[in-house]
Image (cartoon, grey):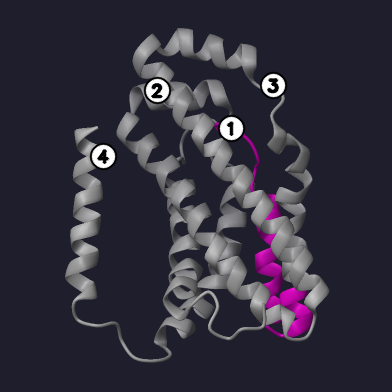
Amino acid sequence: MTNEGFPGRWIEGVGLVAGPALVMGGVLLKLGYDAFFPEQLAAFAGSPGRLTAAYSCFAAGVVLLAAAVLGLARRIAATHPLLAQWGMALTLAGLFARAFHAGVSHLAFQLVDVQGLRTAQQAISEQYGSFHVFQTINLATMAGWVVLAAGTWRSGALGRVQSVALALMAAMPVGVLKGTGVTSIIAAAGLCVALVPLGVKVLARGPAPKWWTYPLAAVIVAGATLISLAG
């Protein structure tokens, strides 16, 4: 965990910058709709492109945040290894749970397309809250950010203001088909304040990427977009 090269400058830097940005993008795209699931399904029926983009951005941001968490844990471990281990473990577990919730939300949206809005709302309402293994770590999903923030403050990995901002991510609502409320915006804003400046510094260190990485990245993004549209 103290290896200075792990998880790598570009992986860590992209996670620190793009992770919070995508989470914020997903939160803002859901503005204007009621935050609870029946209305989220109705919003998808009326604006499928916007809601798909919102939930996709949020899910992608959650995945990229895993790299950011690993980088923060490495920094914390240099002086406070126990805080680093617990902060990393709890926060990553919470990110895995959010990825699971994103998959369930995606399925719910597909029900709207296949079965219609009313049938989809009825099916989800009858199963909403049913047991799944990630329910057992709902507390970790929120508390992990507080523990991680305590580590960044105690170790000096982040300043006091940034550490407090990181802890605000604990306010992000947990579960399936969660829309945007005041706490969602506060949590996403805190995440951006805490991590994006550090990510910019990480990316600025060392040499620029090889010239061929730019067209390669463009081809990958274009290919992924075409595959999604074809599907």
The numbered mark at residue 228 is 4
Q: Hey, what amino acid is under mark 1?
A: Val
The numbered mark at residue 130 is 3
- Element class at badge 2: helix
Can residue 158 be seen in the rendering of this structure?
Answer: no
Contact, mark 2 vs mark 1 (Cβ under 8 Å)? no
Q: Which residue does the numbered mark 2 point to in the structure image?
A: 110
Q: How many marks?
A: 4
- Element class at badge 1: loop
Mark 3, other Cα within 10 Å: few <14 / some 14–19 / many ≥20 = few
**Which quarter of the figure is the C terminus placed in?**
top left
First-in-chain label (3 vs 1) = 3
Q: Residue extending furthest right? A: 82
Give the distance between the C-alpha atoms of the residues marked 1 and 4, in whole angstroms.
22 Å
Q: Hey, what amino acid is under mark 3?
A: Ser
Give the image location of residue 16, x and y in percent: 50, 70
Q: Which residue does the numbered mark 1 point to in the structure image?
A: 176
Residues in magenta, as a range: 151-179
- Element class at badge 3: loop
Q: Is residue 180 left or right of residue 116?
A: right
Give the distance between the C-alpha atoms of the residues marked 4 and 2, in whole angstroms.
14 Å
Q: Nearer the viewer, residue 65 or 200?
A: 65
Give yes or no for residue 153 being in the magenta stretch. Answer: yes
Q: Hey, what amino acid is under mark 4?
A: Ser
Q: In this view, does 211 lie to the left or right of 64?
A: left
First-in-chain label (2 vs 1) = 2
Q: In this view, does 111 lie above or below 71?
A: above
Q: Is residue 78 above or below residue 46?
A: below
Contact, mark 1 vs mark 4 (Cβ under 8 Å)? no
First-in-chain label (1 vs 4) = 1
